[in-house]
Image (cartoon, rainbow, N blue to C red):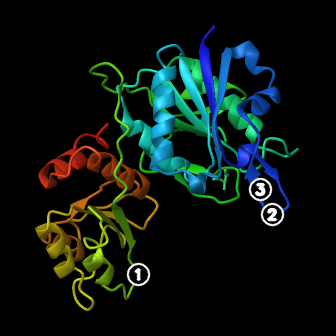
Amino acid sequence: MKKILLLSTGGTIASRTAGNGFVPAAEAEDLLCLIPELKDLCEVRYATLMNLDSSNIQPEEWADMASAVFRALSVCDGVVITHGTDTMAYSSAALAYMLQNLNKPVIFTGAQIPIEEPDTDGKRNLKDAFSAAVDGRLAGVYIVFDGSIISGICAKKVYSKNRHAFESINRKPVGEIVEGVVSLYDTSERLIDGPLTLNANFDSSVLLVKLTPGSSSAILDAAVSLGYKAVVIEAFGLGGIPNVRRNLLPSIRRLTAQKIPVVVTTQCVYDGCDLGIYHVGVSAVEAGVVSAGNMTTEAAVVKLMWILGETTNFDQIIERFCKGEHGL
Ligand code: ASP
């Protein structure tokens, strides 16, 4: 029988009402007690790593999760992590970057309704996550939610209440789970070229700027003095950045001249950036920005934090950011 570790970190799935809003309180053991049939699927180990609303999960917690997974995978066949949905896409991307050459499954899941409530989606999601973990064909970091299996670097929370909280952005979901049966659509194997490694250094000095019509360049000009070492601009459409009135390009040029990487993502949910189509994209490239292509904003921000944890050399940051498919 496969050995699967459940690491609980909090979120709605573990929440209870406390009179002043839901607070994560149930421990890993409490979650498991509600799904006794998991014992027929695998040998279940468990630990409560933290009990946080995911709004409070930050790079320090990503490092704790990745270290726990790294240790567990020397003895377990896979890990299921229960986590709040709000920042799950950031955490799944973070673990995907931190844990290189993963040859076992690390499955994030959670719920929109607490597992102890009668109409919860948590039981189904947790069961599905275990089914994915024992399946034997998945290696890497995934989110399993409402029957979808999504690569951890392509996920985005798209509903704040609906059970179908996550979608796979710019890549098909990896598969689906219906009544415990796992079907994979994407069976392409990722290249694993060495032993599992853990690099949990993150530098969170990444500024994310979402443009609006009328955005001033003041925030870009202040970035360096505020301590930021990289900037992500969530631009319009295919990656358009104003270059006439309230022209942001001089500020971008000043940032890149100071060796601060400026990455462009899009405010659109689907299809990513293409800076070569419109002049408002081409002129941004001329000013020194780098396109995040098909990456989500979540993955782009997390990847920059991860790279900055290892190097502050401008050319190396750009090279590593652009390397491979999401650099995995
Ligand atoms: N606020 C919760 C969290 O992210 C929402 C959820 O888990 O669905 O922790």
Q: Position of residue 21 (x, y in %)?
A: 78, 61
* Whether label 2 touches label 1, CB < 8 Å: no
Q: Which residue is mark 1?
A: 212
| In front of the other: 221 or 79 | 221
Q: Is residue 134 left or right of residue 140?
A: right
Instruction: Examine the rendered structure and indicate whether residue 126 appears above or below residue 16.
Output: above
Q: Is residue 154 left or right of residue 158?
A: left
Q: Mark 2 and mark 1: span between their CA atoms?
A: 34 Å
Q: Quadrant of the C terminus?
A: top left
Circle 2: element type? loop
Q: Which residue is mark 3?
A: 22
Observer-side mark, 3 or 2, equals: 2
Q: Is residue 5 left or right of residue 14?
A: left
Q: Is residue 105 left or right of residue 222?
A: right
Q: Mark 3 and mark 2: span between their CA atoms?
A: 7 Å
Circle 3: element type? strand
| In front of the other: 126 or 228 | 228
Name which residue lies at 58% across and 23% down.
133
* Whether label 1 touches label 3, CB < 8 Å: no
Name which residue lies at 74% across and 53% down.
23
Residue 86 seen in render: no
Q: How many marks on residues?
A: 3
Q: Position of residue 76 (x, y in %)?
A: 54, 16
Query: Identity of the amino acid at label 1?
Result: Thr
Instruction: Examine the rendered structure and indicate whether residue 218 appears above or below residue 98.
Output: below
Query: Identity of the amino acid at label 2?
Result: Asn
Mark 1 CB lies closer than 8 A to ligand 1: no
